[in-house]
């Protein structure tokens, strides 16, 4: 059985800086792998390379055994890679529901060409469907809306009462929840979360932990970047550690926690002040 995601020798240079340096990683079906490391270690760059927002200088990304290196983000989303962003990205003028429907429609565009057995005639099939079977289209749209509402309900009272509110009116923490909901509407094979609790206070972080845990229990495969080590240690099946673009450790949470190289790089004198300052600044600068 090949891994769902396999990264081989992935490398990205920015001028003289090698942000991601010959990184190998794999994520099995249903697994939650966390990628941790100090600020600037290359975690977000790695996500950008995997999700088609950036192209590697060397190395390969395999998804379900197929080489997807350098494919555009839209194609990767349609193949089932969904991500959220470190600084949160939602469509500010769309409602919560419509933001989530954007994710659902991305998935639908991926399956539509096969509707009616007209491969390669996606737009035509779509038009025919709209003309000939308007009630089927309406039913399909209604199904998507129902699914979107179910996904929103995962976030309980935080989002449900705000389903029709525009995203710009939401708190920072709620916008992050909407972003995850949108990613889930894609029904992703692999969900990539870049610091989903950044800027969240302790109770919001605990809520997010429970949501991620429930996704994992449902079998969702997750690649998680997170600075909050408590959360990482509680949720992860395995943890990989990046430092200066290189993978310096990988293993079970307890193994990684006690690895001297990790303690030196991530928790040691070299970086710990920086990490604490960053966490504090985020919490202060972006009230949830
Ligand atoms: N587009 C870019 N151009 C030049 N340098 C970049 C670019 N993107 C990232 N970098 C650099 O690459 C390195 C890795 O950055 P990256 O954002 O991947 O780190 P990170 O591990 O996500 O850090 P953080 O925990 O702060 O989010 C940093 O030194 C960063 O300044
Ligand atoms: Mg980052």
Image (spheres, helix red, strand yellow):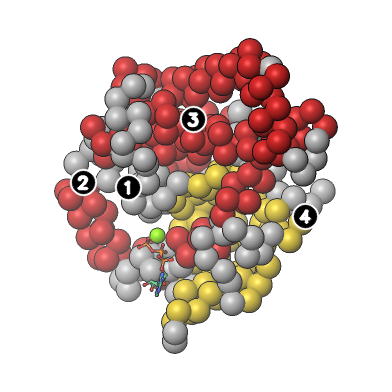
The percent position of residue 141, horizontal first and vertical second, equals 56, 21
Is residue 210 depicted above or below 280 in this figure? above
How many discs appear? 4
Asked if disc 2 and disc 1 are in contact, CB closer than 8 Å, the reply is yes
| Of pointers 3 and 4, the one earlier in the residue sequence | 4
How far from the left and from the top, in percent, is residue 243?
46, 70
Spatial CA distance of label 4 from label 1 is 32 Å
Residue visible at 46% across and 31% down in the picture: 100
Q: Secondary structure at mark 3?
A: helix
Nearest to N terminus: mark 4 or mark 1: 4
User: Which quarter of the rendered picture does the C terminus lie within?
Assistant: top left
SS assignment at label 1: loop
Residue in front for this viewpoint, 206 or 288: 288
* Mark toward the viewer: 3 or 4: 3
Q: Which residue is mark 3?
A: 101
Q: Please, is residue 126 above or below residue 270 in the view?
A: above
Residue at numbered disc 2 = 286
Q: Is residue 167 left or right of residue 233?
A: left
Q: Nearer the viewer, mark 1 or mark 3?
A: 3
Residue 202: percent from the left, percent from the top?
28, 37
Q: Which numbered dot is residue 198?
A: 1
3 or 2: tag closer to the N-terminus = 3
The residue identified by callout 4 is: 65
> Callout 3: 10 Å neighbours few (<14), some, many (20+)?
many
**At x 63% / y 76%, what residue is drawn?**
58
Q: Residue furthest bottom?
A: 16
Determine the CA span between mark 3 and mark 2.
26 Å
Taking the spot 66% from the left edge, 30% from the top edge, the residue there is 127
């Amino acid at each position: 059985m090949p891994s769902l995601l396999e990264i081989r020798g992935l490398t990205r240079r920015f001028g003289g800086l090698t942000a991601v340096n010959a990184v190998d990683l794999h994520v099995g079906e249903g697994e939650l792998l966390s990628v941790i490391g100090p600020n600037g270690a290359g975690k977000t760059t790695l996500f950008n390379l995997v999700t088609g927002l950036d192209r590697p200088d060397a190395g390969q990304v395999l998804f379900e055994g197929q080489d997807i290196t350098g494919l555009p983000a839209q194609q990767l989303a349609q193949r089932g890679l969904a991500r959220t962003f470190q600084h949160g990205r939602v469509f500010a003028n769309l409602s919560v529901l419509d933001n989530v429907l954007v994710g659902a429609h991305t998935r639908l565009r991926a399956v539509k060409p096969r509707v009616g057995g007209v491969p390669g005639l996606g737009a035509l099939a779509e038009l025919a469907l709209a003309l000939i079977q308007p009630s089927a289209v309406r039913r399909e749209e209604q199904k998507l809306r129902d699914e979107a509402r179910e996904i929103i309900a995962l976030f309980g009272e935080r989002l449900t009462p705000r389903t029709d509110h525009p995203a710009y009116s939401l708190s920072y923490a709620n916008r992050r929840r909407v972003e995850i909901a949108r990613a889930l509407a894609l029904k992703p094979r692999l969900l990539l979360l870049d610091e989903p609790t950044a800027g969240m206070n302790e109770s919001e972080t605990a809520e997010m932990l429970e949501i991620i845990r429930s996704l994992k229990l449902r079998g969702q495969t997750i690649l998680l970047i997170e600075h909050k080590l408590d959360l990482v240690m509680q949720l992860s099946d395995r943890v990989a550690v990046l430092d200066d673009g290189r993978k310096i450790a990988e293993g079970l949470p307890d193994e990684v926690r006690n690895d001297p190289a990790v303690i030196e790089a991530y928790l040691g004198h070299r970086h710990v002040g920086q990490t604490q300052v960053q966490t504090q600044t985020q919490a202060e600068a972006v009230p949830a």
